[in-house]
Image: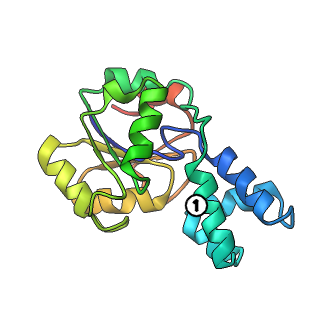
Amino acid sequence: MRILWDFDGTIMDTYPAYTDILYDILNGQFTKEEIYQQLKVSQSHAMDYFQLTDEQRKEMIEKSRAITNYTPFPYVENVLQQAEVNVIMTHMNRASVERILQETDLAKYFTEIVAGDDGFARKPDPAAYVYLHERYQLDYAIGDRELDLIPAKKAGFKTIMFQNDCDAADYTLNDYHHFFDLIP
């Protein structure tokens, strides 16, 4: 099995930290559940939705980059261990992704990372997905947002939605403990 992974919200459980940051920036004007739902679309969507000022946007980005307590989702390492190839396509910058993977002892499972500062167009543009698919003949793309799956469909491989729902997904997965029960 050859898998393309999104990073934030798919490998790492980052949304609780992002939610707390935005909750503080918004001075508790919205519930954490409301904030979480908007962040699940995307961070830029949430910043637009909550009409953050330029100063608040900068604060959100800086505090997001400063997060140090990244936690992989339970059982994600089991899936990584059993996959033949794992690659990442993320909007996060390369230095942060590599640091987090080293700190969580997951770096050894990844053959390649395409990060936000590598020059590829942002999702949903499929260029990075096509590049990775041509190099590794990928079977699946897994992400937590529709934005992660649309380019995979365009590139021609199966999609797995993690902890969310969308029409673009071939499979929907709530946790990694049941990954191999669902995915052939």
Closer to us: 106 or 68: 68
Up-down: is 169 above or below 119?
above
Q: Position of residue 77 (x, y in %)?
A: 44, 24
Task: Judge left or right: residue 68 versus residue 75.
Answer: right
Q: Position of residue 128 (x, y in %)?
A: 25, 58
Query: Which part of the image, by quadrant, shows the C terminus?
Result: top left
Colour approach in the figure: rainbow
- Residue at 37% from the left image edge and 62% from the top image edge: 150
- Mark 1 Cα-neighbour bin, 10 Å: few <14, some 14–19, many ≥20: some
Up-down: is 108 above or below 20?
above
* Circle 1: element type: helix
Number of numbered discs present? Answer: 1
- Residue at 61% from the left image edge and 44% from the top image edge: 67
Whether residue 115 is visible: yes
Query: Which part of the image, by quadrant, shows the N terminus?
Result: top left
Task: Judge left or right: residue 92 versus residue 140.
Answer: right
Q: Position of residue 115 (x, y in %)?
A: 34, 52
Q: Tell me the amino acid under the disc marked 1.
A: Ile
Task: Judge left or right: residue 13 versus residue 3.
Answer: right
Quadrant location of residue 126? bottom left
Q: Which residue is mark 1?
A: 61
- Residue at 70% from the left image edge and 78% from the top image edge: 51
Residue at far left of view: 134
- Residue at 49% from the left image edge and 42% from the top image edge: 10
Whether residue 181 is visible: no
